[in-house]
Image: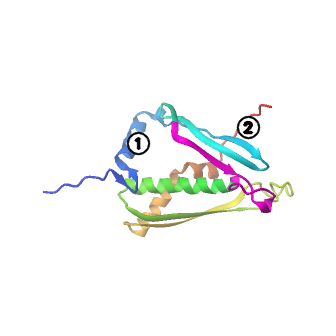
Amino acid sequence: MTTTTEPMARNGVDVPNLFGTINVVRDQPALAKFQFRATNRWVIGTHSRTTIETFSGAGGEHAHIKEYAYDADHPAVLVAADQGPTPVEFLLHALGACLMAGVANIASARGVELTAVEATVEGDIDLQGLLGLSDDVRNGYQQMRVNFRIEGDAPPETLRKIVEQSRARSAVYDVLTNGVDVVIDVDA
């Protein structure tokens, strides 16, 4: 007689811990409330640096294993020093990374072993809006597109459904497509 056990990790995801977390939050919804924080400091010109270190959630304050730092700037063609990606490129990164994390978790939860996943994220922007040259052109992206290439031990339709569920549960996709209130306070 042979028995099989679910692997502890699939696609690098600790599946038992994933389901354990879901069950704990289902029983204690207050644990689902999180606040993430980032501090951005001007360096020079359009160059700034964001640090991310602490957040609250699951009933307490937490620190990442280290402080993360990200530089942002504009490229030389936009009269800057190109010391990092533009802020709108970070938005592409945020969307791609959020969708990718969802794909990994959902595939793992469904027992699908992934062999390769790549998402190409593009955004079209007309700078006339943010340069103040046209009130008819929005300041941000006019459209964003995500193209997934995904391979695994499941049929193509199952892989497509995994990506679709990731989209349906993505926090970043939700913010981009449904908006969020942004409050800006100034201490001068």
Q: Quadrant of the N terminus?
A: bottom left
Along the line of sight, which residue is nearer the eye, 131 or 33? 131
Point out the image quarter for the C terminus. Answer: top right
- Left or right: 36 as drawn, with respect to 24: right
- Name the kind of residue labelled 1 in the image: Ile
Residue 184 bears which disc, if any? 2
The magenta segment is: 63-87
Q: Helix, strand or loop at disc 1?
A: helix
In the rendered image, residue 187, in percent from the top left (x then y), is placed at 77, 31
The answer to which image quadrant residue 161 occupies is bottom left
Question: Who is closer to the viewer here, 74 or 24?
Answer: 74
Which residue is rendered at x = 69% and y = 42% of the image? 40
Element marked by disc 2: loop
Three-letter amino acid code of the residue under disc 2: Ile
Can see residue 72?
A: yes
Q: Which mark is residue 22?
A: 1
Position of residue 149 relative to residue 169, above or below, is below
Closer to the chain start, of discs 1 and 2, is 1
* Residue at the (71%, 41%) spot, across then down: 41
